[in-house]
């Protein structure tokens, strides 16, 4: 039987249509297994790690707390000024995504847009986007970590970019982790849902939003970070402080750390997404056993689930053939890929690995649900809970596109007549 962990990567690459996928399992002493799938030149390639960056921002906040530079119950306004939006939110609420603030900053989708400085970010987000009262519910907020990054800048007198490099990356020996991609970093790809043709995704400097998802890293460096999260460097973060970060504030989140479960108990870490990339790193704080995965695709795999599978998943008997990107759709197939209906049942037609697939769309999947409240479509379940779905109509009354929290949905992918579409809520990290 093939090596179980390699099979996990092979299946994920084939079913998720991932250009490349790398992964590793580690313990307190270092990597115990590493593998790759797809068009991957090696295990040393850099990938964007998205919201794994948040775990580093959170550690910097906790270090500042331990140094007496701030308190977790401080209000944002104490550090950034009473005029700043969400000035009443506490740092603890920002770390745990319980402040009730909106999920994304106002304006174009920040992950696809060149970032501004903090002054511009603060001016655009005045607090009117609040979706819940403080502490009322868990509502993931990228904006909150943009604010945390500026708080760190104010209390330390150092830019977040410099702080994360000097205080965390250098002492940990994470020499292959950087703010911007280095030469030969992996390109970010988006795959056309129906044809399998790839499109390069933008690689943006997110500016003031960098503390939420800017960094690039490698499998080897994220193994070092996973060991840190398991308590491997008490000289950098007091063990009691690290333990405090792992205590659940909500069912699935502590202070800057996601909480996942596997057969052995609770794993801590984070997943991450940016246009063209997905990543995940989780570790069992008790045993020190964890795993890392990195891929260059906008969607296609549940990185948290894949990490758990690498650690303790079941054997897989049948492995599909590897996915190969489409270079050109044959003329005989032109016009076929897309959405079709069989009676009232929706079917998608995909050109996949030189064959035509028909797939029913009735399978279970993640969703965001909206209901009408006083004339507004308000999210009541899923990633967009509490957000408003805005319907943009054309002059003739037909619907042009939909927008919720900067996620733009159009009739066709990447419609040039409207703003660039947003991400996939079920995959946001």
Image: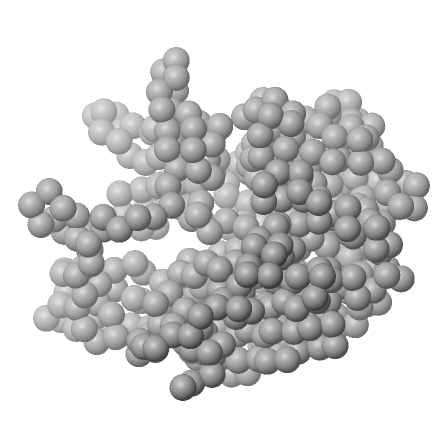
- Of 10 and 20, the residue lying toward us: 10
Residue ID at (49%, 76%): 5
Vertical order, 295 against 51 (above or below): below
- Of 127 and 25, the residue lying toward us: 25
Q: How many marks?
A: 0
Name the residue at the front extreme: 264
Question: Which color scheme does this rendered protein use?
Answer: one colour
Image location (x, y in percent) of residue 12: 41, 69
Name the residue at the right extreme: 68
Residue ID at (92%, 41%): 68
Residue ID at (53%, 74%): 22
Left or right: 355 in relation to 312 = left
Image location (x, y in percent) of residue 159: 80, 50
Name the residue at the left extreme: 343
Left or right: 117 in relation to 370 = right
Image location (x, y in percent) of residue 9: 45, 74
Vertical order, 67 against 50 (above or below): above
Name the residue at the top extreme: 374
Residue 238 seen from this side: yes
- Of 359 and 286, the residue lying toward us: 286
Residue ID at (77%, 22%): 82
Vertical order, 348 against 325 (above or below): above
- Of 121 and 366, the residue lying toward us: 366
Quarter that holds the N terminus? bottom left
Left or right: 321 in relation to 281 = left
Image location (x, y in percent) of residue 381: 43, 33
Rendered image quadrant of residue 230? bottom right
Residue 208 seen from this side: no
């Amino acid at each position: 039987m093939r090596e179980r962990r390699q099979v996990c990567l092979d299946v994920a690459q084939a079913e998720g249509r991932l250009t490349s996928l790398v992964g590793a399992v580690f313990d307190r002493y270092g990597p115990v297994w590493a593998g790759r799938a797809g068009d991957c030149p090696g295990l040393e390639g850099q990938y964007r790690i998205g919201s794994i960056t948040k775990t580093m921002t959170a550690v910097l906040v906790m270090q500042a707390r331990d140094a007496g530079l701030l308190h977790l119950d401080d209000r944002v306004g104490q550090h950034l000024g009473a005029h700043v939006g969400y000035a009443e939110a506490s740092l603890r609420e920002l770390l745990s995504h319980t402040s009730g603030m909106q999920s994304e900053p106002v304006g174009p989708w920040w992950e696809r847009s060149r970032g501004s400085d903090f002054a511009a970010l603060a001016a655009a987000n005045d607090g009117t986007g609040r979706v819940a009262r403080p502490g009322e519910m868990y509502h993931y907020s990228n904006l909150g970590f943009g604010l945390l990054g500026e708080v760190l800048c104010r209390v330390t007198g150092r830019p977040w970019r410099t702080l994360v490099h000097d205080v965390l990356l250098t002492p940990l020996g994470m020499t292959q982790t950087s703010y911007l991609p280095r030469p030969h970093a992996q390109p970010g790809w988006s795959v056309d849902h129906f044809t399998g043709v790839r499109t390069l995704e933008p690689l943006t400097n997110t500016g003031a939003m960098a503390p939420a998802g800017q960094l690039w890293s490698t499998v080897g460096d994220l193994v070092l970070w996973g060991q840190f999260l398991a308590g491997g460097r008490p000289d950098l973060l007091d063990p009691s402080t690290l333990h405090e970060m792992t205590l659940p504030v909500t069912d699935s989140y502590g202070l800057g750390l996601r909480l996942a479960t596997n057969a052995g108990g609770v794993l801590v870490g984070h997943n991450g997404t940016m246009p063209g990339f997905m990543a995940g790193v989780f570790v069992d704080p008790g045993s020190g056993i964890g795993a890392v995965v990195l891929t260059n695709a906008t969607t296609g795999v549940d990185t948290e689930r894949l990490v758990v599978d690498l650690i303790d998943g079941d054997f897989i008997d049948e492995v599909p053939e590897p996915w190969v990107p489409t270079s050109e759709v044959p003329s005989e197939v032109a016009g076929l890929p897309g959405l079709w209906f069989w009676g009232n049942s929706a079917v998608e037609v995909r050109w996949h690995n030189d064959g035509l697939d028909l797939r029913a769309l009735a399978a279970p999947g993640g969703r965001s649900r909206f209901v009408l409240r006083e004339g507004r479509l308000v999210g009541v379940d899923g990633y967009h809970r509490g957000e408003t779905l805005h319907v943009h109509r054309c002059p003739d009354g037909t619907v042009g596109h939909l927008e919720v929290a900067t996620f733009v949905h159009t009739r066709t992918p990447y419609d040039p007549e409207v703003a660039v579409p947003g991400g996939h809520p079920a995959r946001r990290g």
